[in-house]
Image (cartoon, grey):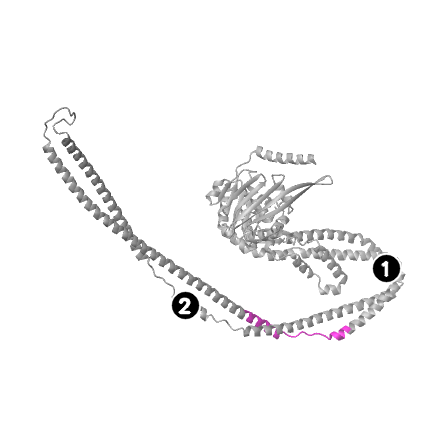
């Protein structure tokens, strides 16, 4: 899946921004804030135009809020592109000419040098099939417009085109019609050809059918009117003919003979044509049987490919798999490392306490020694005032001080010895921790190497299994083809032979009829010279016949286009296959109903209705609630996108606020359940953002635009346009 990650807009309906998407995005805000602009920007970026406006760059430029340029673009994982629309004005013979052009840029480039190659690249990367539904606008459409909308979507993945329509019309031009009614056949052939000219090559199937139906309807009305205008003249011609039949019966006899010969010629020609067709069928059957014999022998001669070596290699690789587990050893080392680190930390704290005690002892020794030095230096005088004589005896203090110094010195020696032992113990702990870390690294290296080797073996097993499946599939196809060819050959072999007449003899007899007919056709015009007064009436009669032929031809074409013809077939080939998928999508939305499409009413009138079944009763779309209608359309659109299968599957729904709170909640949750079938779901509407956010959607709250902001943008465009007009 390749979801759209970012939307870029510049000068589009007042928006210049980059919007980051999550794949399930809801745009909310007040009317005019710019919610729909995000959906339209995606549509323009993918298609190069907005269908609601038209396909020309000038049509799309109507979205621009700048007089000079507008651009939209999309970013997808590993690929981005943008479409720019530029307005240029130049003078031609004193008259300004405005040209709107579109350019396309892509990144990264693969050497595309022109817009055609770039468009092909965009189509290959992201496709050109975004489905955008303006729900409010859809509800206001007529049956015919709804049909056209649905056909335009389904047409993205259907096989109906101008060629197939022409082939359907060819079914009207039967061999029997050509023999029995050659005039009708030729006019029908001409009518079909002219009607198909209305179907332009670039049109979709729905556009082509609309064009043909419009033309056929107008022409049918025209030729019906012409047929009515000549009825009076035909009655006059009939009366004149009756008067002449009383005096000139020779012409009648010759015409009767000519009619008889033509009937015989028609019957004989039909027989020749039928027997000739039978002979061609017999020849084709013989050729087909020979081809089938060759195919059967070829399939039998193909030996099945052995898979024994592949299965042996798979067994060997599976036996080489190393499932050794060093986790227990690794965990033990990890536990030991943690314990040693704890011991080391405790030892370091003990050494720190020893250092503190040693410093304290040294300070105390220094203080006592300083007092002794002062006593010794000031013997016989006061230590405070040297001029005062003092005979105090400090011998007792000096003896006690010397004892204190010795005690502290001895304790210092003990501390030094204990600290040295602790230091050596710490070095041993550091050395062991380093050894443990090396052992753990080695286990990790072995484990990774073993996993790498096992993965390589697993990948090889997968490739071998794929190769085996391909060989088995090929063998199954060979056997199926052989069985089908043998059954078809047996059917052709046992079919009874066709009985045909002598084609050479019948051809000679037909030549005799044609010679006699040619002779009568040379004589009769001379005899008809006596009927000069009837020539004008006869021309009128012929005109009437042509009008009737034309009317009949257009009626046949119209019927072939109707619900019992092409449109009915389209329903079968385009809409009928979608029913189960739509039903499944409805179920995901919490609605369990069968789906129907109807193109013909009970009275045979052409209609386009759809909806779901409530038991045996049809519930038409227009009778559903607003919420149910949107649910049906969402199920339909997801099915169409899934069937069309573009590289990037985008569903955009506007005016979601038409749902009440309950139906909105159901729609939001249902769409999330269908997310796996889509890359991006974009909805827009004036709704409470909390509802969408609580349902799990990414909500983009579009701030309202001030009236002054909107007016200033419009005034700026108008002022610039007026300025250019003045310069011209």
In the structure shown, which secondary structural element does the residue marked by tag 1 occupy?
helix
Quadrant assignment, res 642: bottom right
Query: Which residue appears farthest toward the top when viewing the image?
Result: 388
Residue found 88% across the figure and 57% down from its top: 533
Position of 555 relative to 681 (above/below): below
Range of magenta residues: 480-507
Say few, some or many: other residues with alpha carbon within 10 Å of mark 1 (under 14 / 14 to 19 / 20 or more): some
**Is residue 617 visible from the viewing direction of this image?**
no
Quadrant assignment, res 505: bottom right
Q: Which residue is mark 2?
A: 315
Percent coordinates x, y for residue 559 in the rendering: 68, 56
**Is residue 81 visible from the viewing direction of this image?**
yes
Q: Quadrant of the C terminus?
A: top right
Percent coordinates x, y for residue 162 in the rendering: 66, 56
Q: Which residue is mark 1?
A: 241
Residue 489 on the magenta segment: yes
Quadrant assignment, res 503: bottom right
Residue 491 on the magenta segment: yes
Say few, some or many: other residues with alpha carbon within 10 Å of mark 2 (under 14 / 14 to 19 / 20 or more): few
Residue found 14% across the figure and 26% down from its top: 382
Q: Examine the residues drawn in magenta and state their main secondary structure.
A: helix
Q: Nearer the viewer, residue 288 or 474?
A: 474
Percent coordinates x, y for residue 118 in the rendering: 59, 51
In this rendering, position of residue 37 left or right of residue 323: right
Give the label, 2 or 1, closer to the camera: 2
N-terminal of the two: label 2 or label 1? 1
Q: Which mark is residue 438?
A: none
Q: Nearer the viewer, residue 442 or 127?
A: 442
């Amino acid at each position: 899946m390749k979801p759209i990650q970012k939307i870029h807009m510049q000068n589009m309906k007042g928006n210049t921004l980059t919007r980051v998407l999550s794949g399930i995005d809801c745009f909310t805000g007040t009317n005019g804030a710019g919610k729909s602009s995000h959906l339209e920007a995606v549509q323009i970026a993918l298609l190069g135009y907005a269908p609601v406006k038209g396909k020309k760059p000038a049509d799309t430029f109507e979205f621009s809020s700048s007089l000079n340029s507008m651009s939209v673009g999309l970013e997808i994982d590993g690929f981005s592109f943008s479409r720019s629309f530029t307005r240029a004005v130049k003078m031609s013979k004193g008259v300004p000419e405005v040209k709107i052009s579109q350019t396309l840029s892509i990144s990264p480039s693969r050497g595309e040098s022109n817009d055609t190659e770039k468009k092909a690249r965009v189509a290959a990367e992201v496709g050109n099939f975004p489905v955008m539904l303006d729900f409010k606008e859809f509800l206001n459409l007529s049956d015919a417009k709804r049909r056209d909308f649905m056909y335009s979507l389904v047409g993205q993945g259907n096989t109906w085109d101008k060629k197939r329509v022409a082939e359907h019309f060819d079914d009207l031009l039967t061999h029997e019609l050509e023999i029995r009614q050659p005039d009708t056949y030729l006019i029908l052939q001409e009518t079909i050809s002219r009607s198909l000219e209305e179907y332009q090559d670039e049109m979709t199937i729905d556009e082509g059918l609309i064009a043909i139906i419009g033309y056929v309807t107008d022409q049918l009305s025209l030729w019906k009117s012409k047929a009515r205008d000549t009825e009076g003249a035909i009655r006059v011609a009939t009366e004149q003919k009756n008067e002449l039949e009383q005096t000139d019966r020779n012409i009648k006899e010759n015409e009767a003979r000519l009619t008889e010969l033509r009937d015989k010629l028609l019957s004989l020609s039909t027989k020749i044509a039928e027997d000739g067709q039978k002979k061609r069928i017999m020849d084709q059957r013989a050729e087909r049987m020979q081809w089938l014999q060759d195919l059967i022998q070829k399939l039998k001669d193909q030996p099945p490919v052995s898979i024994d070596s592949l299965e042996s290699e798979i067994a060997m690789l599976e036996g080489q798999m190393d499932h050794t587990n060093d986790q227990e050893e690794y965990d033990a080392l990890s536990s030991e490392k943690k314990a040693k680190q704890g011991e080391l930390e405790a030892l370091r704290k003990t050494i720190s306490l020893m250092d503190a005690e040693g410093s304290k002892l040294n300070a105390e020794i220094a203080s006592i020694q300083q007092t002794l030095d002062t006593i010794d230096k000031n013997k016989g005088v006061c230590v405070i005032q040297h001029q005062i004589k003092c005979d105090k005896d400090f011998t007792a203090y000096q003896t006690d001080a010397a004892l204190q110094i010795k005690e502290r010195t001895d304790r210092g020696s003990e501390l030094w010895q204990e600290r040295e032992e602790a230091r050596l113990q710490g070095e041993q702990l550091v050395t062991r921790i380093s050894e443990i870390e090396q052992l753990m690294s080695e286990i990790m290296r072995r484990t990774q190497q073993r996993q790498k080797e096992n993965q390589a073996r697993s990948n090889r097993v997968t490739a071998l299994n794929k190769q085996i499946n391909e060989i088995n599939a090929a063998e199954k196809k060979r056997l199926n083809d052989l069985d089908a060819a043998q059954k078809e050959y047996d059917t052709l072999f046992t079919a009874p032979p066709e009985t045909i007449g002598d084609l050479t003899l019948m051809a000679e007899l037909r030549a005799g009829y044609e010679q006699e007919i040619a002779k009568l056709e040379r004589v009769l015009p001379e005899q008809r010279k006596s009927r000069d007064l009837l020539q004008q009436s006869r021309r009128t009669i012929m005109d009437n016949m042509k009008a009737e032929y034309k009317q009949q031809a257009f009626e046949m074409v119209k019927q072939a286009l109707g619900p019992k013809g092409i449109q009915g077939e389209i329903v079968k080939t385009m809409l009928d296959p979608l029913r189960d998928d739509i039903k499944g999508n409805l179920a995901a939305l919490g609605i369990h109903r069968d789906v129907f499409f109807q193109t013909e009413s009970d009275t045979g009138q052409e209609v386009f209705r759809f909806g779901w079944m409530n038991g045996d009763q049809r519930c038409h779309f227009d009778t559903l609630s607003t919420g149910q209608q949107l649910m049906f359309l969402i199920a339909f659109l997801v099915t169409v996108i899934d069937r069309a299968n573009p590289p990037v599957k985008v569903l955009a729904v506007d005016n979601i606020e038409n749902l009440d709170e309950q139906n909105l909640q159901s729609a939001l949750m249902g769409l999330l359940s269908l997310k796996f079938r889509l890359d991006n779901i974009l909805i827009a509407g004036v709704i409470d953002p909390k509802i969408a956010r609580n349902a799990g959607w990414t909500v983009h709250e579009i701030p309202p635009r001030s009236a002054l902001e909107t007016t200033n943008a419009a005034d700026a465009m108008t002022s610039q346009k007026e300025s250019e007009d003045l310069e011209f």
